[in-house]
């Protein structure tokens, strides 16, 4: 779910050939980096197109986490409603390589470059598991500091086709003047008056195999040609487009599967250092943990059930559902779950609790011992429906100032959805298997 917004900056894309093997279909694989990862900072220091690394918020500072929480608050109310494999084909990647980036200045959304049309035009798009439509800007005004925003021109691509109102992917036929008119689209966000609208088009998404032949593959996908962007999309959120990864039939994973390019599954790996990877067609491994999705046929999402929470030695029977959403920075829980988890953590923490700080969204924060090894951090794990365990490898965030270290339980109180955010996915390869309707996960080194 696109729920976090801050300033947008361009990133360098690092090519990394993974050589993944699959017995069940092609795999599109891409590495992920976030805005404040060391590789990005190093490149920004020498690039004339990026602001100097010194201008970036200091990772771990109060301002750093304040910005992430601010981005979370922007679009948490978005209308979600709009918003073993079978062959031995070769793994695939985007034509520009397998690099993606998690941009912390947008609150840890993941980005990748895609190439569309003929001749190909490159776009850096945000990856969002909480929405379905892939769209790029075609018209209108977009601003991103130190970043040249690309715009897609249907007339400039010899392979572009307008999607008519009688197409099965046209969801807004009631707004059509006739069945052969251009199909309109609109995605609205409740908060921040943020939306995108335009027409649907079909064009080539450039891919390539990851075997020794490195063959180019052209996959026709349907996407939004954004004519009017409003609110945060004008300057601080995905000004160069959004890549929906949801379950609806218009999403790119759905199209790639339906057209026989990949299995109907993908994975996202979340490294501790911000380096990660997304693999289209990946169904994970036989030894991964799994839990079923709670599928609403009218609007399927990556919703799962949690039956227990363990904090240290305290085991709590708590039954709740949550959206597993890589597009949200932090984890959001409503009561009574939030209060029971937080109070259990607080009862086990040995360090002095700090008074609430309006700069950050976390209520349970503590002074870290001068000897960091002396601070006792209670462990945290979730029991999913079916009994599989999901250990949270890093349940806290550490905030550094010039004179002190502070750590906080990295859960935010929610009055709306329960969301398992990206921070709790760190250290895992997370598989969104839409064929088996299960979420899979396994501890993984994303650099491998």
Image (cartoon, rainbow, N blue to C red):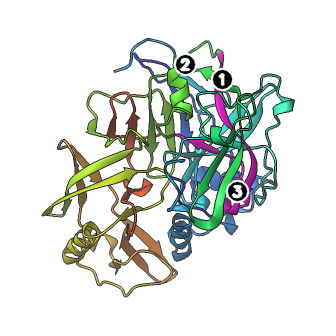
Judge the density around disc 3: few (<14), some (14-19), many (≥20) Cα neighbours within 10 Å. Answer: many
Residue 253 place in picture, x, y as percent: 52, 31
Residue 259 is tagged as 2
Under tag 1, what secondary structure? strand
Q: Mark 1 points at which residue?
A: 220
Kindly report the secondary structure that dominates the magenta region of the rendered protein: strand
Q: Distance between the residues labelled 3 and 1?
A: 29 Å
First in sequence, mark 3 or 2: give its number.
3
Q: Quadrant of residue 214?
A: top right
Under tag 3, what secondary structure? loop
Taking the image as shown, residue 330 lies to the left or right of residue 12, namely left
Residue 392 place in picture, x, y as percent: 30, 55
Instruction: Write down the region rendered in magenta.
Output: 216-245
- The residue lying toward the viewer, choosing from 1 and 35, is 1
Looking at the rendered image, the disc whose residue lies closer to the viewer, 3 or 2, is 2
Is residue 360 shown to the viewer in this render?
yes
Residue 9 is tagged as 3
| Image quarter hosting the C terminus | top left
């Amino acid at each position: 779910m696109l729920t976090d917004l801050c300033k947008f900056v361009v990133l360098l894309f690092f090519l990394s050939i993974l050589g993944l093997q699959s017995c069940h279909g092609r795999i599109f694989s891409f590495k992920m980096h976030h805005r404040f990862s060391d590789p990005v900072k190093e490149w920004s220091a020498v690039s004339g197109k990026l602001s100097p690394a010194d201008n970036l918020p200091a990772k771990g500072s109060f301002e750093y986490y304040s910005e992430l929480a601010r981005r979370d608050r922007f679009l948490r109310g978005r209308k979600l409603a709009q918003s073993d494999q079978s062959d031995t084909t070769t793994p695939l990647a985007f034509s520009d390589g397998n690099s993606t980036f998690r941009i912390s200045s947008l609150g840890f959304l993941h980005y990748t470059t895609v190439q569309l049309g003929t001749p190909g035009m490159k776009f850096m798009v945000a990856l969002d598991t909480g929405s379905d439509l892939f769209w790029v800007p075609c018209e209108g005004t977009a601003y991103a500091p130190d970043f040249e925003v690309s715009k897609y021109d249907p007339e400039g691509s010899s392979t572009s086709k307008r999607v008519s109102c009688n197409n099965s992917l046209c969801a807004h036929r009631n707004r059509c003047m006739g069945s052969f008119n251009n199909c309109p689209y609109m995605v609205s966000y409740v908060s921040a008056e943020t939306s995108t609208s335009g027409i649907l088009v079909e064009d080539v998404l450039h891919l390539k195999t990851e075997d020794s032949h490195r063959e180019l593959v052209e996959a026709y996908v349907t996407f939004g040609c954004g004519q009017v962007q409003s609110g945060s999309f004008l300057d601080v959120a995905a000004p160069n487009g959004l890549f929906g990864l949801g379950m609806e039939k218009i999403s790119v994973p759905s199209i790639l599967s339906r057209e026989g390019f990949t299995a109907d599954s993908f994975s996202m790996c979340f490294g501790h250092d911000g380096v990660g990877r997304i693999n289209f067609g990946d169904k994970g491994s036989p030894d991964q943990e799994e839990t079923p999705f709670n599928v609403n046929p009218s609007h399927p999402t990556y919703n799962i059930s949690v039956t227990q929470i363990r904090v240290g030695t305290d085991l709590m029977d708590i039954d709740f559902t949550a959206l597993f959403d890589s597009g949200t920075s932090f984890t959001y829980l409503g009561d009574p779950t939030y209060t029971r988890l937080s109070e259990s953590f607080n009862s086990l923490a040995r360090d002095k609790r700090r008074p609430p700080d309006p700069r950050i969204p976390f209520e349970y924060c503590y002074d870290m011992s001068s000897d960091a090894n002396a601070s006792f951090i209670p462990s945290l794990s979730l029991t999913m429906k079916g009994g599989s365990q999901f250990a949270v490898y890093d349940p806290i965030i550490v905030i550094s100032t010039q004179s002190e270290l502070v750590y906080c339980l990295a859960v935010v109180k929610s009055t709306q959805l329960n969301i398992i955010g990206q921070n709790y996915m760190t250290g895992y390869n997370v598989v969104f298997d839409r064929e088996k309707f299960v979420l899979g996960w396994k501890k993984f080194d994303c650099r491998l």
